[in-house]
Image: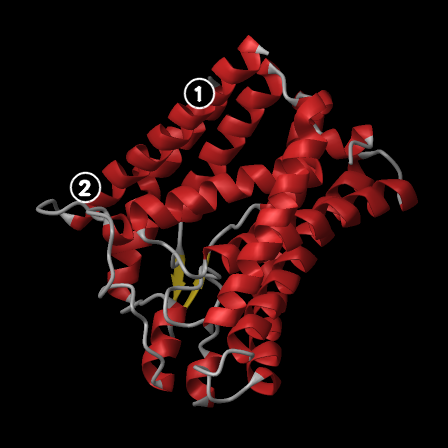
Amino acid sequence: MKTIIVIIALVIISPLFGVVLADMVGYHEPLDVAAEELGLNDTSEEVNWTPFFDYSIPGLDPVIGYILSGFIGIGVIIAIGFILRKVVERR
Amino acid sequence: MHQLLNNGVQGVHIPDGFLDPLWSIITYAVAIAYLGISYTRSRSLWSIETTSLVTVLAAGIFAAQMLNWPIPGGTSLHFVGGALAGIILGPFLGALTISLVLIVQCLVFHDGGLTALGANILNMGIVAVLSGYLLYRLSIKLVGRNEHGRFIGGFLGGWISITLAGILCGLEIGLSPQFPYGVLVSIPVMGLWHLVLGVVEGLITGLVVVYISKKEPGFILAERGVV
């Protein structure tokens, strides 16, 4: 339970690092900066398969989107863990 | 160009468009082979307890990776957790755990490219996990199964594992024809930056391992000699 509370707290404060501070220092993913300056073609945005691109949710404020993305990611991991647990129980 | 490279690359999620198709295939093949072996080797370890541990650790590492510290100039710093997973869950369950995180990041959030998923799993889910595990084992063998041995093992495991993951990332990018400067530029730059910034990964890993060893010593599978 204590671990879960820590994980939830991490997600809630995460936009401070992933969005707010990033905007303040004009941060971009370093590999993206490298690609641009070296003339490499990062095709991420051309070929996209998810509405949650880069931990954002369409139509939502980036900070809220980042937090919700965190919970979506953790929800997906817990769902997979739940399925694994059921498989292990059946064995 | 060097200014750019000096900006460094701590976020080691390689996006699409960076890797040559040949390297994409090779890294996928190695990653699939290792994960297949990991599944087979860890079958006897799967229990309700380990399933919960894998899930909680994967969720924790996913959340920790979202705390991305941007450093002015374009470098970022975030915890990767490969060594921590290797120390707590061993080299096979640990690899499966980090791979789960990387697959969710790639498929749900497009963090890391689909064509580079094999490389990202190889760098962070296999090399970082395995090297972190081995260095931890070495430390508790040489220093002892005590607080010092655990901290040193966690610290060196976290630090060196990130450096190795960075070097490998540099190798994969440098060997791809898309990167015009080659491995003589990409490897030293990636390796040096990860050597510097990886100290933080080492400190966090060492402290977390010592904390867990005090609370739940049985959770550290690397100490049980599980391989």
Q: Nearer the viewer, mark 1 or mark 2?
A: 1
**Residue A58 image point, x, y percent:** 12, 47
- Seen in the picture, residue B175 relative to B68 is either above or below; the reply is below
Q: Earlier in the sequence, mark 1 or mark 2?
A: 2
Crowding near pointer 2: few (<14 within 10 Å), some, many (20+)? some
Crowding near pointer 1: few (<14 within 10 Å), some, many (20+)? few
Q: Which quarter of the rendered picture does the N terminus of chain B lie within? A: bottom left
Q: Please, what is the three-letter code of the amino acid marked with disc 2? A: Ile
In the image: residue A73, left or right of residue A90 = left
Q: Which residue: 51% across, 50% down?
A: B79
Evaluate whether residue B128 shows in this view: yes
Evaluate whether residue B88 shows in this view: no
Residues B50 and A16: in front is: B50
Which corner quadrant of the image does residue A7 belong to?
top left
Q: Which residue: 56% across, 15% down?
A: A88
What's the chain of the residue with tag 2? A
- Seen in the picture, residue B213 relative to B190 is either above or below; the reply is above
Please tell me the numbered disc located at residue A83.
Answer: 1
Residues B69 and A73: in front is: A73
Q: Which quarter of the rendered picture does the C terminus of chain B lie within? A: top right
Please tell me the numbered disc located at residue A64.
Answer: 2
What's the chain of the residue with tag 1? A
Asked which secondary structure carries label 1, the reply is helix
Q: Which residue: 34% across, 85% down?
A: A39
Residues B149 and B96: in front is: B96
